[in-house]
Image (cartoon, helix red, strand yellow):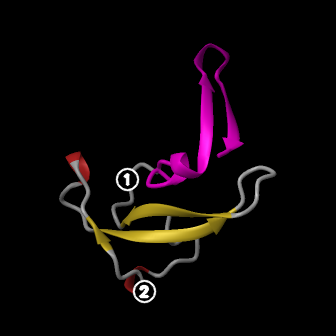
Amino acid sequence: MGLALGAVWEDQRLSLPLGGNLARFEARALVVNATVEQFPAVDLAFAWTQDKYAPLILGHMNFFLAFDVCFYRTESAFEISQK
């Protein structure tokens, strides 16, 4: 995913520990400036690993600090608002 965002692995200096079944892989912090819907751009932080099978959770490190998200499970929908 980092490559798709135009990042270079060697340029990312901050290492992060991963847990669970990804604990054996090295991870690096990747921060990208992103626009979500109609809201102003915000920096979103990702943990990036070179394991090509690692799942991606959108901005897991700080997405939910920047936005409020309401999930409507029975409708298979969600709503995002800026904090």
**Magenta stretch encompasses residue 3:** no
Q: Nearer the viewer, mark 2 or mark 1?
A: 2
Q: Residue at x 23, y 51 (%)?
A: 19
Would you place residue 54 above or below residue 14 in this image?
A: above
Residue 61 counted in the magenta span: yes
Amino acid, disc 2: Asp
Q: Can you give x and y, in whole percent of width and height, for residue 80 in the image? A: 68, 39
Q: Is residue 24 left or right of residue 52?
A: left
Residue stretch in magenta: 57-83
| Label 2 Cα neighbours within 10 Å, binned few <14 / some 14-19 / many ≥20 | few
Residue behind mark 1? 53
Residue 52 visible here? yes
The answer to whether residue 7 is above or below residue 42 is below
Q: Position of residue 33 (x, y in %)?
A: 63, 69
Residue located farthest toward the top when viewing the structure as drawn: 74
Point 42% across, 86% down: residue: 11
Q: Quadrant of residue 72?
A: top right
Could you tell me which secondary element the residue under label 1 belongs to?
loop
Identify residue type, mark 1.
Answer: Tyr
Q: Residue at x 24, y 62 (%)?
A: 17
How many discs mark residues in the rendered view? Answer: 2
Which dot marks residue 22? none
Marks 2 and 1 sit apart, C-alpha to C-alpha, by 22 Å
Q: Position of residue 31 (x, y in %)?
A: 51, 70
Q: Is residue 14 left or right of residue 46?
A: left
Q: Nearer the viewer, residue 20 or 66?
A: 66
Q: Secondary structure at mark 2?
A: helix
**Which mark is first along the chain, 1 or 2?**
2
Establish if 29 lies above or below 18: below
Horizontally, residue 51 falls left or right of residue 34, namely left
Q: Around disc 1, counting alpha carbons within 10 Å, would you say few (fewer than 14), some (14 to 19), or many (20 or more)? A: few
Q: Which residue is tagged 2? A: 11
